[in-house]
Image (tube, grey):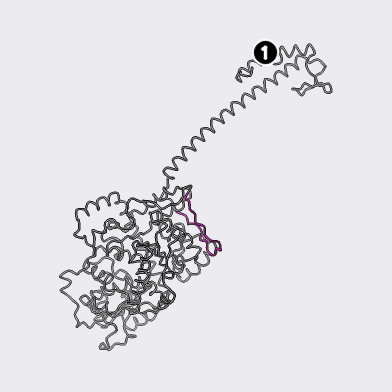
Amino acid sequence: MQDRPCSAWLDFLEQGSDDDPLFSARGLNSQAEQGTTKVDPQRGQWPWHNAEPHNKKAPVSAVAASNMMLLHHARLHMKMNLLASALSKTSMLCASLLVMLSLVSLMSGPILDLERPSPVPVALRKGSSEAYQPSRRLGDRTLVSASPTEDIWTSTLAEFYQGCSSPSDSFSKSPPTSQTRSIILIQTSGGLNQQRTGIVDAVVVSRILNATLVVPELDHNSFWKDSSNFSDIFDVEWFISTLVSDVIVVKELPSSLGIREDKIYSMRVPRKCTPDYFGDRVLPLLQKKKAVRLTKFDYRLSNKLEKDLQKLRCRVNYHALRFTPPIKAMGDSLVGRLRQRSGRYIALHLRFEPDMLAFSGCYYGGGDVELEELGLIRKRWKTLHQKNPERERRNGKCPLTPEEVGLMLRALGFGSDSHLYVASGEVYGGESTLAPLKALFPNYYTKDTLATKEELEPFVGYSSRMAAIDYMVCDESDVFVTNNNGNMARILAGRRRYFGHRRTVRPNVKKLGTLFLAKPNMTWEGFASKVRKAQKGFMGEPNDARPGRGQFFENPAACICESPKGKDELGRKRAAFKDGMEDELNEREAEEEEDDVDQDVELDIYQEEDSDSIVPELVGRSKAGVHEDMPLMSD
């Protein structure tokens, strides 16, 4: 009886069985007729039925009701067994699927949509008194440095390229004349590297106008309030002598002109003017006034020029502009100390200062405190419109946090034993923000940790001089990493291309943002693989950008030539490198064109803090009777 299936039990109860009178209808009736059925003596109730009998002997109708109750319970029991069996099979199927999915995830990591909007990163731990405990895991895998197949410390094709900035024969045959009576004065704008672009272009404009250039004036009114002059940062004698074949440069306004410096006519030209603009609009004024001052001179000359003028840019930028002996000595000393600690090192231009974050309009999860602090800084730019933080990050406009930079470098294959030099001003959030980066790279250095206070004393209080020291250490590094495609990042990237295509890593922020969001659910190997894929085309290789595309100071293609060494090998490697890169190059170039437009707008806004200095120029312009169509740009 115990081995019968549920359906057999139903048949058994309905049809009855002579073998077991307890479970047969006939047997139950027989027991009732014989008076052997058990009855509660107090209530006269059947143990399996709640109805009271009308007499001591159960009538046939009561027995039948009892049989129906047994039948009902048997059916319910059968249904419960069937349900339990179904649930058991479903559970086994779900468990099998979970095991399969876990194996797939373990082997390949989750599939990410790199085009999906990227939210803001983990909140900055500003003001935290607790020591930072680095997260050593991504998903369930221990964080270790990735192991890419190529050498991440050197550029693949570097040995096949070299800088070349010598002038053509035709350019050399038309040197500047010492008889010129026209004088160009330049007022640069911004920080050290933004002013550097103005100095370079000032030389080129002087050549275009066949004018004598007075050593450029540096900006003393910008955010940094640095009182340094040109001679405090750059070697003036070297500058003048190096350019003697291209432009006549003098240290000060010649007294023979009989013009007081405060009476010199000042004007501001639009950004990215062509040589024809200077010839048509500035040259007539220069011939009439004998001296003209061009103010806020940064990025005022076109990005695209004829080849000889581009090469002149390179001769100024990479050869004529040399730091003063004190700055050079301090920079060389820091580089030497890093080399003593390790044969090679990484230099990171972190660019995570409060003014940078405020201007970017990005949000880093610091709550009301961050919004209030950065909001106060943003007020200095009256025309800076409100930005959507999530959209800015999605479009690659937000600098990575120090922790994200560290994770990117580890994913690319740089080990925790790598030596890291960080060039940065005041980092927003202080030590609590830097703690994750220091945990990822314990060999962490700055100029303050490598030099004594006494050694840095001559440079303290002068932001441009301190920036020049960082510039030197970053330039001499084996690997240079940027965190914002600003002036220093672009200028150093171009310089490193010119001098041998040394490795320069520029984060592909647009794609990395999504990866950093998804990392808690990824294996470390999967995360590192996707970082390396996202960084393809952003590692400082010669073919990362097509010649002539992007900002010239970042990609000085006119000044880079193929070396005679192994041209056949170069062609083979170049073809292999470009394979599959066409889409990436097209996408990057479109983004760079958009970035150039954005940079022009941002430079105008960024400089509006000292727009009051425009007033004297407007007065001078009115008194000089300059034509109303002469442009005077508001920065």
Residue 379 in the image, given as x and y percentages of width and height: 48, 70
Residue 122 sits inside the magenta stretch: yes
Residue sitting nearer the eye, 166 or 189: 166
Give me the residue at 71% from left, 11% from top: 26
Q: Is residue 390 above or below residue 290?
A: above
Amino acid on which disc 1 is placed: Gly
Q: Residue furthest front?
A: 340
Q: Tell me where residue 570 sits by quadrant.
A: bottom left
Is residue 36 among the parts visible in the rendering? yes
Q: Is residue 557 above or below residue 17?
A: below
Residue underneath mark 1: 16
Give me the residue at 26% from left, 71% from top: 319
State the SS at label 1. Answer: loop
Residue 424 in the image, given as x and y percentages of width and height: 42, 67
The reply, left or right, for residue 403 in relation to residue 58 is: left
Residue sitting nearer the eye, 340 or 526: 340
Q: Is residue 136 above or below residue 33?
A: below
Residue 291 in the image, given as x and y percentages of width and height: 27, 82
Q: Tell me where residue 331 sits by quadrant.
A: bottom left
Q: Residue furthest right?
A: 42
Is residue 611 among the parts visible in the rendering? no
Q: Is residue 164 above or below residue 85?
A: below
Residue 530 sits inside the magenta stretch: no
Looking at the figure, which quarter contains the C terminus?
A: bottom left
* Label 1 Cα neighbours within 10 Å, binned few <14 / some 14-19 / many ≥20: some
Residue 110 in the image, given as x and y percentages of width and height: 44, 45
Looking at the figure, which quarter contains the N terminus?
A: top right
Question: Please, what is the dominant secondary structure of the magenta stretch?
Answer: loop
Magenta-colored span: 118-138
Residue sitting nearer the eye, 443 or 96: 443
Q: Tell me where residue 276 sits by quadrant.
A: bottom left
The reply, left or right, for residue 401 in relation to residue 586 is: right
